[in-house]
Image (cartoon, coloured by chain):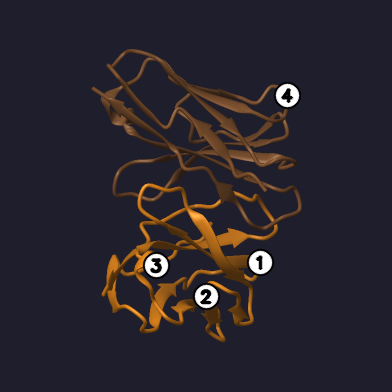
Chain colours: A brown, B orange
Amino acid sequence: EAGVAQSPRYKIIEKRQSVAFWCNPISGHATLYWYQQILGQGPKLLIQFQNNGVVDDSQLPKDRFSAERLKGVDSTLKIQPAKLEDSAVYLCASRRETGNTIYFGEGSWLTVV
Amino acid sequence: DAKTTQPNSMESNEEEPVHLPCNHSTISGTDYIHWYRQLPSQGPEYVIHGLTSNVNNRMASLAIAEDRKSSTLILHRATLRDAAVYYCILRDGNAGNMLTFGGGTRLMVKP
């Protein structure tokens, strides 16, 4: 079974620029998550989708972050404009609707300079 | 999700057992205890989970205290590939399916 795919793996941008990350979850997984992990900390949930609907986006900084999952499969996370403190690893994860296990991708590493 | 407390770091010798503790004194009756680990430069991966009874799988064992206020992840024979950050997480089985991560325990394995 293919895992959660993310791209790009690494990205360096200047502050105030924009960036987009793409995620393809495991086939058949209805639930998709985006997490932000700052160096030395545990991952923090940004947004959770169930199919193409948002379940929880309470910790998403909506003034600069947006995410969508239009067809209930792939998802995109966008940051515009980026700040220095957005430097982090952005992890996508997915889960089967009736499953307990959450599967994570390898992450997209963002450096804002 | 209820909070967990773990040591920041632990050391182990290769091929020896490792016991990683986790305190969760405010656990509720519907909280499952999950363990994930994160190898360097990778996303977290599932290790094991349980509710009340001890659990075993090919990766590890989970020992849950009778009052459920603490648990221990047991790696029976640590290898260098087990060096990672181990996260103990409580997930409410009745509400929501996200994982709320703490700081975890960084396990270092010495050859």
- The answer to whether the residue labelled 4 contacts the one labelled 2, judged by CB atoms less than 8 Å apart, is no
State left or right for residue B50 relative to residue B71. Answer: right
- Amino acid under disc 4: Lys
Residue that numbered label 2 is attached to? B60
Q: Quick one: which residue is furthest to the bottom in this view?
A: B66
Residue that numbered label 3 is attached to? B82
Residue that numbered label 4 is attached to? A71
Residue that numbered label 1 is attached to? B30
Q: Relative to A33, does residue A99 appear above or below in the rendering?
A: below
Q: Secondary structure at mark 1?
A: loop
Q: Secondary structure at mark 2?
A: loop
Identity of the residue drawn at 63% across and 56% down: A101
Q: Nearer the viewer, mark 4 or mark 2?
A: 2
Label 4 in the same subunit as label 2: no
- The answer to whether the residue labelled 4 contacts the one labelled 3, judged by CB atoms less than 8 Å apart, is no
Q: Chain of mark 1?
A: B
Residue at mark 1 to residue at mark 4: CA–CA distance = 33 Å
Residue B56's label in the rendered image is none
Identity of the residue drawn at 50% across and 69% down: B26
The residue carrying pointer 2 sits among few (fewer than 14), some (14 to 19) or many (20 or more) residues within 10 Å by Cα, namely some
Q: Chain of mark 2?
A: B
